[in-house]
Image: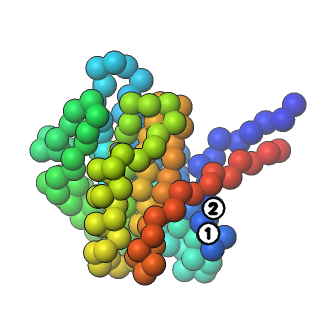
Amino acid sequence: MIHINKKYVYILPNNKTLFIRSEAIEKMLKYRQNKLRSLEAGGILIGRILIENGHYIIDDVSEPMPTDKRSRYRFSRKPEGHQEYFNTIWERENGCCFYLGEWHTHPEYVPTPSSVDRKDWNRLVRLKFENDILFFVIVGIKEIKVWYGDLNEREIIELKRRDFVG
Ligand SMILES: [Zn+2]
């Protein structure tokens, strides 16, 4: 029998990889919009870039904060709470973590970015960050999809997920 390992590994266009730790996946999946009344949720992605090989890891995510605007089809993240959460992790990790992008949920099985999402992402890839790559995660009901934004090329590309067979 073929067993597909449900690891969340995505391949970048330059063949580097993004690995999302299961702790981060579980936090995001708590907000999956699998009920009619569930509202969109979101937060920031926090992680590391492995110096040896340039691969990316998302270790943790922030969760919705009271000031965020949440509705069935819209999530608007405010800085309050998310920044403090990042600072706490940053201090705990002695500065060895980065802001790596944004995540939010969609009430659809396989998520596709809305025009508002595209606009937000396009704005973000034109800003300055410590690293020149950002990730954008949308958690659908059945699938988690990841896009990556290249801050030098200012382009946004959907990443393919790698399935492990074995
Ligand atoms: Zn969206």
The furthest residue to the top: 36
In the image, is residue 51 above or below residue 78? below
Q: Residue at x 16, y 52 (%)?
A: 78
The amino acid pointed to by label 2 is Ile
Q: Residue at x 63, y 51 (%)?
A: 161
Q: Is residue 47 visible?
A: no
Which image quadrant for residue 155?
bottom left
Q: Residues within 10 Å of mark 1 (few under 14, many from 20)?
A: few
Question: Relative to residue 51, is residue 106 drawn left or right?
Answer: left
User: Residue 47's x, y, as percent?
Assistant: 43, 63
Indicate the quadrant of ligand 1 in the picture.
top left
Alpha carbons under labels 1 and 2: distance apart = 7 Å
Q: Is residue 51 above or below residue 12?
A: below
Q: Which mark is residue 13?
A: 1
Q: Mark 1 or 2, which is nearer the eye? A: 1
Q: Tell me, for residue 11, which label it has, or none.
A: 2
Q: Is residue 64 above or below residue 16?
A: above
Relative to residue 51, is residue 113 drawn left or right?
left
Q: Quadrant of residue 60?
A: bottom left
Disc 1 residue type (three-letter): Pro
Q: Is residue 116 left or right of residue 158?
A: left
SS at mark 2? strand
Q: Tell me which corner region of the image, top left, top right, bottom left or bottom right, holds residue 80.
A: bottom left
Q: What is the crowding at mark 2: few (fewer than 14 residues within 10 Å), some, or many (at least 20)?
A: some
